[in-house]
Amino acid sequence: GSIRTVKLFANEDREIQRYNGQVEKVYELGRKSGIYSGSFYGSIGLAANLSMLSVLTYGGTMVIDQQISIGDLTSFLLYSAYVAFALSGTATSYNDICRGLGATERVFELLDREPLIKSPENPVVLDSIKGDIEFTDVSFSYPTRPDS
């Protein structure tokens, strides 16, 4: 946002390096988040599918042994799917809650931060200012172009 100031002090290369460093940090955080999220949801999906297969296998043997009917097995599988779907929603909600807590922590850090420039205890209050401001023996040059 302060490109004019950056150009004024000929610090384009430094700002590009700073920006690239920040972009790299954000990229790494996103990559780690993706790996963790993929691992978490992948393991949840694997556990859900394995449990459904085990229930179907055990329930199939019970149907063959005529301990339960095919309707009972189907009903149990459907109820299990509804419960699993509801539990998967809580996992997503937990992720959102953790993000919100992290953002809240950052907001409180900013609110608790002490300013680098302290306000004077007894500030000078001017009723009115009149006159001219004159600069004498002042010079300026760019660090990369001292002759200009």
Image: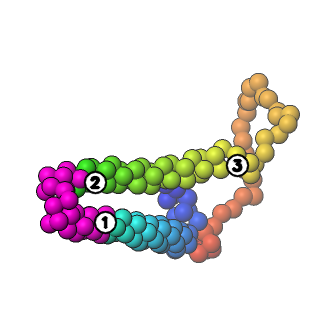
Residue identifier under label 1: 51
Q: Measure how far apart labels 2 and 1 are at the Cα level.
A: 10 Å
Question: Crowding near pointer 2: few (<14 within 10 Å), some, many (20+)?
Answer: some
Question: Crowding near pointer 3: few (<14 within 10 Å), some, many (20+)?
Answer: few
Left/right of residue 45 with respect to residue 70 in the rendered view: right
Tag 2 or tag 3, which sits nearer the N-term? Answer: 2
Q: Pinpoint residue 31: horizontal percent, then vertical percent.
A: 42, 71
Q: Is residue 60 shown to the viewer in this render?
A: no
Residue identifier under label 3: 113
Looking at the rendered structure, the secondary structure element under dot 3 is loop
Q: Measure how far apart labels 3 and 1 are at the Cα level.
A: 50 Å
Quarter of image, res 53: bottom left
Q: How many marks?
A: 3
Looking at the rendered structure, the secondary structure element under dot 1 is helix
Residue identifier under label 2: 80
Question: Crowding near pointer 1: few (<14 within 10 Å), some, many (20+)?
Answer: few
Q: Which residues are magenta?
A: 48-76
Residue type at mark 2?
Ser
Q: Is residue 135 above or below residue 145?
A: above
Left/right of residue 60 with respect to residue 3 in the rendered view: left
Q: Measure how far apart labels 3 and 2 are at the Cα level.
A: 50 Å
Q: Is the C-beta separation of discs 3 and 2 under 8 Å?
A: no
Is-magenta flag for residue 63? Answer: yes
- Residue 9 shows which numbered tag? none
Q: Which of label 3 and label 1 is nearer to you? A: 1
Residue that sits furthest to the front in the current view: 66
Quarter of image, res 30: bottom left
- At x 49%, y 53%, the residue is 99
